Each structure stands twice: as C-alpha cells, then as structure tokens.
Amino acid sequence: MKKILVIQTAFIGDAILTLPLIQFLKQKYINPEITVLAIPSTSSVFENSNYVSNVIVYDKKGSEKSLLSYLRLIQKIKKMNFEIIYSPHRSVRSTLISFFSGAKNTIGFDKADLSFLYKKIIPYNKSDHEVKRNLALADFDFEKNNWKILPEIEFENIDKEKIDKLFFNDSKKLIAIAPGSVWNTKVYPKNYYIEIAKWLIDKNYFIVLLGGKEDEQLCEEIKSIVKEEIISLAGKINLIESVYFLKKCNALICNDSAPTHMAMIANIPVLTIYCSTIPEFGFYPYNEKSTYISFNDLDCKPCGIHGHKTCPVKTFNCAYKLIPEKVIKKFEEIISD
C-alpha cells in the first residue's frame, strides 16, 4: 500500500480542482492510502471524497498560525511515513512540509516557493487549466481532452431529506445564482444580478440564491428587491449540502469563484461571469454546456490573479461594461435545448 500525501491548503475552488488529481492517483497506484492536508474551510471537500482515506486539518490562519504549531504539524507528518507527496499548493510552507516529511519522493511545481527542495519538479504551465496542471504532477498521459475529469464527492453524510424540502415548486425550472466572492472585484454588480433574476422570473424560472454566511446580506438584498419567485439559502446550508442542492437545479450563474467548481461536481450547466480576472488563468468550467463570459477590451484587465478589495483604477469597468443583456444572451446558449 502506497502512503500518499496531497497538500492543498488554498481556497475552496482550488480544493475542488484538486479532486481529479486525487481520483487519478487512486487509479495510478494499487490500493493507495491517500491523505490530504487541508484547511478547515475546505476539509469537508476531501472528507466527502471516496478517494481520500484521511484528512489532516491545518488551521494555518487561526488556532495553528504560530510557528510552534507549524513545527508540530511537520513532526506529525514525518511520523506518518509518507512515501510520496504531491503538492499542488505552491507556498513556502507547503514546500518545507514536503522537504522535512522524510518522503522518498516529493513532487511540486517549478513556480512553487523554494521549488528546488522538491525531488521532482514539474513545469507550471500558465496556459493550462488548473486540473490539467495538477494532473501533470502525477505524470498523467494527456490525450486531447481526457484531462477533463469531473470532480466527485459523496453525499452520505448529509440530511438529504432536509435539502429535498427546501424547494417544492415542481412546476417551474430552478436556476441558482451565487452572487458573492471572497474578492470584491470578482463580484458582478448587485443591480445587474437583480436585472438577470427579474428576466429569469419573467421566463417562468424560480430563483435560488446560494452562498456562505459572508454572502447572506448580499443575497437578502437581492431577494428583497426581486421579492417574488426567489429565495435565499445563503448561510443556511453548508458547502456539501449546497452541491447536493445544485444537482436539483437546471443551471447556475455565478462569479469566478468556488460555486463554478461546485456546479461541476453537480454536473449542471454553469455560466461563470469574469470581472477583474480572466478564464485564461485556468479556472473556467469545462463540463457539458457550461461556459463563461468576460469583457476583455480593457488595458487594466486582468489586474491580479485573485482580485482586490476595490478596483485599482477606480472604474470597475470590467464589470460595469459587461451589461446584463450580454450575460442573458450567453446564458440562453446553455439553457436552450
């Protein structure tokens, strides 16, 4: 049995896009034991994967942010005697964990901090999708689009009956909108989402707003203006429950954020709206019928790989120039029969 550690302590979207690598590793090796090092906000992604044996939760920005906690983590990992470590995460902490682990083989990207400490270094190709980049760590045999592996999770540990009761209007098709993001310059304007929601309702769709606790106020504001044929589940259901709920939806509209990748797990069409970022960073949806839209005719775009709290040039034209009519037209492409 191969003891393998995968290090991924980034955001939810990054965690989800690591699942195809883990799913491939389960096939690559005979009966491997795969452990994932994750942060509290993403641990449920891996805990609900049938391909993961163990999850080590590392609260690097909370209760374990001290140097002493970090050293304890390294000692813990060293005692677990991993043979192979794959690190899609490129931080110096991840590199040092790999280096001091005692593993016979450690694999990371050439763009990782202190990458020379890895025993095997893989080129980080900026033009590739994140899933394809991650699979390259495991010597995946690429052929055309065979890298487009859909991430998988299981729903054995959730109260499905509770989720099933959340929506009971079977007479209308259900469209989910996830209007929030960790980064403000990734968030499509609230008033534009309101226009889109009203258009969908006119077309006889029912709208459900999704998001975390941090998105609750935004979703409630949208709901209070739209009023009819709309509900908000933001902050009311957790990440895994949200993915399960998405399976009931006909499509999702969202920003360049985690819900894009959650919709890929649910395998429903998703329209991803890019404001300050671009699809070429490699985080676009690739399941059937999914697509994206972006206003690129700007010298200032992209202004960063993650986004910002406020627009660096104070215009936010990457969002404002992407008017709702254009988004609606693109959305019609993925819901047309």
Image (tube, rainbow, N blue to C red):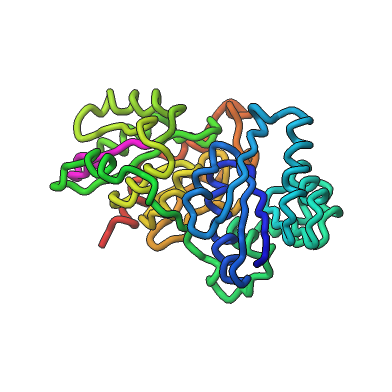
The part of the image, by quadrant, that contains residue 93 is top right
Residue 202 magenta? yes
Q: Can you say which quadrant of the picture contains the N terminus? A: bottom right
Residue 31 magenta? no
Q: Position of residue 280 (x, y in %)?
A: 59, 53
The part of the image, by quadrant, that contains residue 94 is top right
Q: Is residue 194 left or right of residue 23?
A: left
Q: Position of residue 335 (x, y in %)?
A: 29, 55
> Does any portion of residue 1 appear in the rendered image?
yes
Q: Residue furthest front?
A: 79
Q: Position of residue 70 (x, y in %)?
A: 75, 35
Q: Nearer the viewer, residue 94 or 149?
A: 94
The tally of labels here is 0
Q: Is residue 220 left or right of residue 63?
A: left
The part of the image, by quadrant, that contains residue 213 is top left
Instruction: Tell me which segment is drawn in magenta.
Output: 200-210
Q: Is residue 326 left or right of residue 100?
A: left
